């Protein structure tokens, strides 16, 4: 399977307590303020990229299965 990246442009509209409100063309998203770089200010344009990571997904699935097997063997 081919990994696909999706990048969308948002404007940082405002900060509300510990949240950052980003406005896109047709959507609004709220993110934790702590993941926004400190130099970013209200009105700045941000490029938000979302991508999948199949290797990390597989690694975490394997870890979860191992943990579940350990739990089930302990009963």
Image: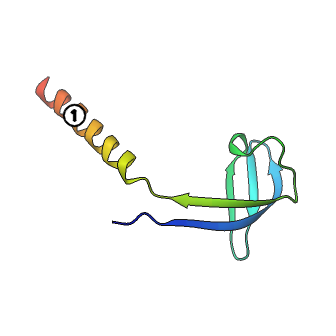
Nearer to me, 58 or 28: 58
**Residue 25 found in image quarter:** bottom right
Residue at point 87% right, 54% down? 42
Callout 1: helix, strand or loop?
helix
6 with respect to 48 (left or right): left
53 with respect to 61 (left or right): right
Give how far across and how far down residue 15 sits, in percent.
81, 50
Disc 1 residue crowd, few under 14, some 14–19, many 20+, Cα 10 Å:
few
Nearer to me, 4 or 57: 4
- Extreme residue in the front direction: 2
Give how far across and how far down residue 22 sits, in percent.
74, 60
Q: Label 1 belongs to which residue?
A: 66
- Extreme residue in the top direction: 74
**Residue 67 found in image quarter:** top left
57 with respect to 75 (left or right): right
Residue at point 39% right, 45% down? 56
Q: Quadrant of the C terminus?
A: top left
Vertical side of 9 occupied by 31: above or below:
above
Tell me if residue 75 can be seen: no
Residue at point 73% right, 46% down? 36
Give how far across and how far down residue 47 sits, in percent.
70, 61
């Amino acid at each position: 399977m081919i990994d696909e990246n999706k990048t969308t442009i948002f404007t940082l509209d405002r900060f509300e307590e510990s949240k950052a409100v980003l406005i896109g063309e047709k959507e609004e998203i709220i993110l934790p303020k702590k993941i926004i770089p400190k130099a970013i200010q209200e009105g700045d344009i941000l490029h938000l990229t979302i991508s999948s990571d199949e290797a990390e997904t597989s690694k975490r699935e394997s870890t979860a299965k191992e943990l579940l097997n350990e739990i089930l063997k302990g009963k």
